[in-house]
Amino acid sequence: MLQSDPVDVIVIGAGIGGLTAAALLQERGISTTVFEKNRFAGGSCSSFEREGYTFDAGASVFYGFGDNERGGTLNLHTRIFRKLQIEVKTVPDPVQIHYHLPKGFDIPAYYDRKSFLDQLSARFPHEAEGINRFYRELDEVYTIIGSLPAGSLEDLTHLASIGFNHPLKAISLAMKTFRSMGKTAREHIRDEELLRFIDIEAYSWAVQDAVSTPLVNAGICLADRHHGGINYPLGGSGAIAAALVRGFEKFGGKIRFNSGVTDILVENGVARGVRLADGSEHFAKTVISNATVWDTFNRLIDDSRYQVEEERFLMAPSWFQLYLGVDGAVIPKDFYVHHILVDEWESYNRPGGTIYCSVPSILDPSLAPAGRHSVHAFVTAEMEDWEQFERGSSAYRDAKESLAASLLKRMERFMPGLSEAIELKVLASPLTLERYLNRYKGSYGPLLKPGQHILQKPQNTTPVKNLFAVGDSAFPGQGVIAVTYSAVSCASSVARKLGNPLDYLE
Ligand SMILES: Cc1cc2nc3c(=O)[nH]c(=O)nc-3n(C[C@H](O)[C@H](O)[C@H](O)COP(=O)(O)OP(=O)(O)OC[C@H]3O[C@@H](n4cnc5c(N)ncnc54)[C@H](O)[C@@H]3O)c2cc1C
């Protein structure tokens, strides 16, 4: 049986969560090896190329690259790359999302907060005061979180230090921790259509309605878009993962691609290392899993005592995706990069109900051949509706083509002539996501059930000693900036446990 020299930390998976934790630990001198099943880094935040087009596999809307708030937890990418002394060039995006909603309700979420609130108030003049009060609540959450150091909610040393150094902010944040975004909205707003809008503001990144979305998470995303703003990495989403790999390797970290972990080696309740698909075993003082909570505990650990039932959390759906190379003439003048389309409120949260669409080549023309654009559109989809198909079969191809045709037709509302302008079309179903992203059922990850609060999310520590979790299964949840937060708090806990605490991120 092959073995490698033991290291301090083994990380399973080179998603943004795993890579960020690995880079921060290695920078601190804690020897770390990353095993990644794919031949590329980034997982849901990777890019791929086809016929001269570069596509974002998943994420396209990026927070955390701002530079106007130097303290606290926000602008995490800026502060991590500063620490790693790696440059990631970004372009500012003037609009987070341009919403196209039922009954001709059409509104861009501008970087400029006043323009956004003025436009929303113009549509709902009778709710102007409530709108301002509600969005002020989100801003207050943002201000508190932005002034506190990032850390785990279960890390008592971290919590004690926050409580000691910032007692009033800590109390205020604790009170807001248990509140929901939707219930808070209802304290200020009555108009049903406006409350639907607040729902889609949550759904756009949380894939849940506002009542199910914690106020704290909403405060981070929906306020930060007006502070640090949305910034797109030149070269596509894969540029973030590539920069983290450079930062990790620069300090001596080792990353092994095409190295799927099949088992986490657990002895008497303690993680000792991992076994790879080639049978080799590798040992470390600590193992960090960047896989989903179901993959980690139901596939990589062969012990029913650690089994995580599907019902413990709400399993977010997977996605059906269209990657399109299009003639540039189809992109309307002054078109924004990110769009959300809802045709009717009754079905916005059902599979296919909401269409997400991004055209990042507007900000970075190198992503498409001259005179062309790369378009990424996607809708939620359930594995149950796709698992009966055989890969490569005509039935599978027909099902994908038929759904794509109906989505393209709907997208013509904001991109007239789209169907006729397509020069390249790549379609992906939940089967594709499960295969390429190595995520159980291709799911977007665990969500809180109604009534559960954020402390009931999986955190960085796990029931297995010396096994930590990082990524979108862990607190705070889905989204590249959220998994980066989970990585900072995970790396802080691991580094402290190994007797070499991380410095505060400047
Ligand atoms: C279609 C789509 C659109 C999105 N849009 C946005 C957006 O606009 N903005 C945003 O912020 N977020 C967006 N997200 C969410 C965001 O991309 C994810 O939440 C985030 O990238 C997840 O990062 P992660 O590190 O937790 O996990 P992942 O990206 O899933 O990475 C995990 C890595 O671990 C590897 N791995 C898993 N199991 C093993 C194993 N056994 N052995 C070795 N390696 C393994 C995987 O191959 C993968 O590389 C989107 C996601 C999708 C799917």
Image: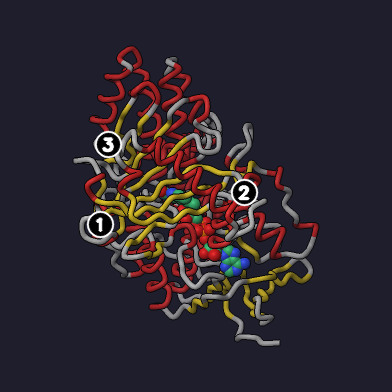
The residue closer to the viewer here, 287 or 238, is 238
Nearest to N terminus: mark 2 or mark 1: 1
Which residue in the structure is indicated by mark 1?
A: 364
Q: Nearer the viewer, residue 334 or 253?
A: 334
Amino acid on which disc 2 is placed: Trp
Query: Foreground mark, 1 or 3?
Result: 1
Q: Type of residue at label 1?
A: Asp
Q: Residue at x 48, y 30 (%)?
A: 181
- The residue that disc 3 covers is 110
**Left or right for 472, reference 120:** right
Q: Mark 3: which amino acid?
A: Tyr
Dot 2 or dot 3, earlier in sequence: 3
Q: Can you say which quadrant of the picture contains the C terminus?
A: bottom left
Q: Is mark 2 within 8 Å of ligand 1?
A: no
Give the spatial CA distance, label 2 vs label 1.
34 Å
Position of the N terminus, as image quadrant, is bottom right
Image coordinates for residue 130, horizontal then vertical, percent: 37, 19
Residue 253 is situated, as x and y percent measured from the top left of the image, at 47, 78
Q: Is residue 35 above or below residue 108?
A: below
